[in-house]
Amino acid sequence: PAIERLAEGNKTDPKAVTEDEWRKVLSPEAFEVTRRAGTEAQFTGKFDKHFVAGGKYTCVCCGADLFLSEHKFNSGCGWPAFSKSVGADQNIVRLRDNSFGRQRTEIRCAKCDAHLGHVFDDGPPADGGERYCVNSVSIDFVPEGKSN
């Protein structure tokens, strides 16, 4: 996670990291999406078509576990899509988003407040009907058996 690259090395609370510190350890794209609630271009993210059995997707900023690979599916929306989050939103906060003249539900990392994307109610019915639509630059993939 990006927080481990901070020069001070003693930041234990991701919410205490300043905007300038995040800017130093994140790519410009990841900073724009995670810290400024931006959106990466559709069909351009490295995890859109990334399907690997066994593993988890973590927050690029703080390393919090967000999604398991078994809940990732191809929604055709152009961004990584998941039907469930780890621990029923254990590390995710949902916020009302009324930007762009429409009502949506934004999802953020509960540990560091990174913008991840949005959740919609058009996911697989068998898995609860939700589709977490996530920006690739806001997540990392950790293969099964490896630690973040």
Image (tube, rainbow, N blue to C red):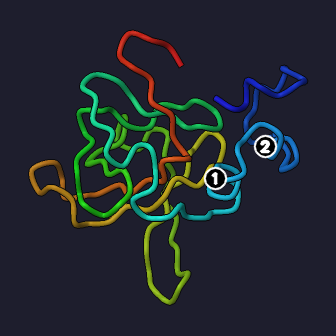
Q: Earlier in the sequence, mark 2 or mark 1?
A: 2
Label 2: how many residues lie within 10 Å, few (<14), some (14-19) or many (20+)?
Answer: many
Taking the spot 35% from the left edge, 55% from the top edge, the residue there is 132
The picture quadrant where one finds residue 2 is top right
Residue 82 in picture, x, y percent from top left:
30, 47
Question: Is label 1 in a helix, a strand or a loop?
Answer: helix
Residue 38 in picture, x, y percent from top left:
61, 64
What residue is disc 2 on? 22
Residue 101 falls left or right of residue 15:
left
Is 143 above or below relative to 82? Answer: above
Is 72 above or below relative to 79? Answer: above
What residue is disc 1 on? 34
Residue 94 falls left or right of residue 15:
left
Residue 11 in picture, x, y percent from top left:
82, 27
Taking the spot 75% from the left edge, 32% from the top edge, the residue there is 13
The picture quadrant where one finds residue 111 is top right
Taking the spot 50% from the left edge, 64% from the top edge, the residue there is 41
Taking the spot 70% from the left edge, 51% from the top edge, the residue there is 31
Residue 146 in picture, x, y percent from top left:
45, 12
- In the current view of this chain or complex, which residue is farthest to the bottom? 101
Is 15 above or below relative to 116? Answer: above
Q: Amino acid at mark 2?
A: Trp
